[in-house]
Amino acid sequence: GAVVSQHPSWVICKSGTSVKIECRSLDFQATTMFWYRQFPKQSLMLMATSNEGSKATYEQGVEKDKFLINHASLTLSTLTVTSAHPEDSSFYICSARDGHPRGEQYFGPGTRLTVT
Amino acid sequence: EDQVTQSPEALRLQEGESSSLNCSYTVSGLRGLFWYRQDPGKGPEFLFTLYSAGEEKEKERLKATLTKKESFLHITAPKPEDSATYLCAAVYGGATNKLIFGTGTLLAVQP
């Protein structure tokens, strides 16, 4: 159980375009989803937290107008990187948890974004 | 400042050579500590959750323990397939249960 999927697994886009990444919880309802980015040989850095039906909460230093997050249902959250630039190239990973106070976070397989 | 530190950064073991990975934390309002395994180019795979000092959990060759200041991941008689980066993460942030990750330990087990 507790499977989280991401789509696409990798994407290459040109500078200035926008890219949408989907995160789905396949076998449970995710009241909260998280978006992380990970640079090579570094750990995961939390970008934002989203609860179903409400606006995302962004971590300090993360541009909310650049990284648009939508959590429209209990099984789907999307991250849109707007006007992407080469410095946005990274590994983006989502995670999801149910509403249990001690619910674990389960991670998706990640999306490799390369901006040329 | 809340912080999670893992050591060593990298560890090379021979198959069958047991060892321990360390995760020390300074997090106010700690609600739990997670261990994950991450293979290259993939998302973290959940291993354990520990909630209180003195708690221990085991899974195959892995055992995780927790004290008030640190957690250990003990690897007994490792195999090459145990090679991966092991991440620990402290749970904080009230009801949202946000995670702060350590930088990981890259484990290589040689046959």
Image (spheres, rainbow, N blue to C red):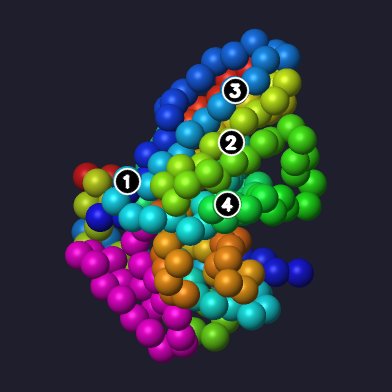
Q: Which residue is mark 4?
A: A53
- Secondary structure found at label 3: strand
Residue A74 location in percent, x, y?
44, 51
- Real-space Cα distance between discs 3 and 2? 8 Å
Q: Is residue A67 magenta?
A: no
Task: Name the amino acid type tagged 2.
Answer: Leu
Return the chain for callout 3: A
Q: Tell if the residue under mark 3 belongs to the same chain as the one under mark 2.
A: yes
Distance between mark 3 and mark 1 Cα atoms: 22 Å
- Crowding at label 4, few (<14), some or many (≥20) Cα neighbours within 10 Å? few
CB of mark 1 within 8 Å of CB of mark 4? no
Q: Which residues are magenta?
A: B46-65
Which mark sits nearer the N-terminus, 3 or 1? 3
| Quarter of the image where one finds residue B95 | bottom right
Crowd around label 3: few <14 · some 14–19 · many ≥20 (10 Å): some
Q: Which residue is mark 3?
A: A19
Q: Amino acid at mark 4?
A: Gly
Output the chain of dot 2: A
Judging by the rendered image, the residue that carries numbered circle 1 is: A26
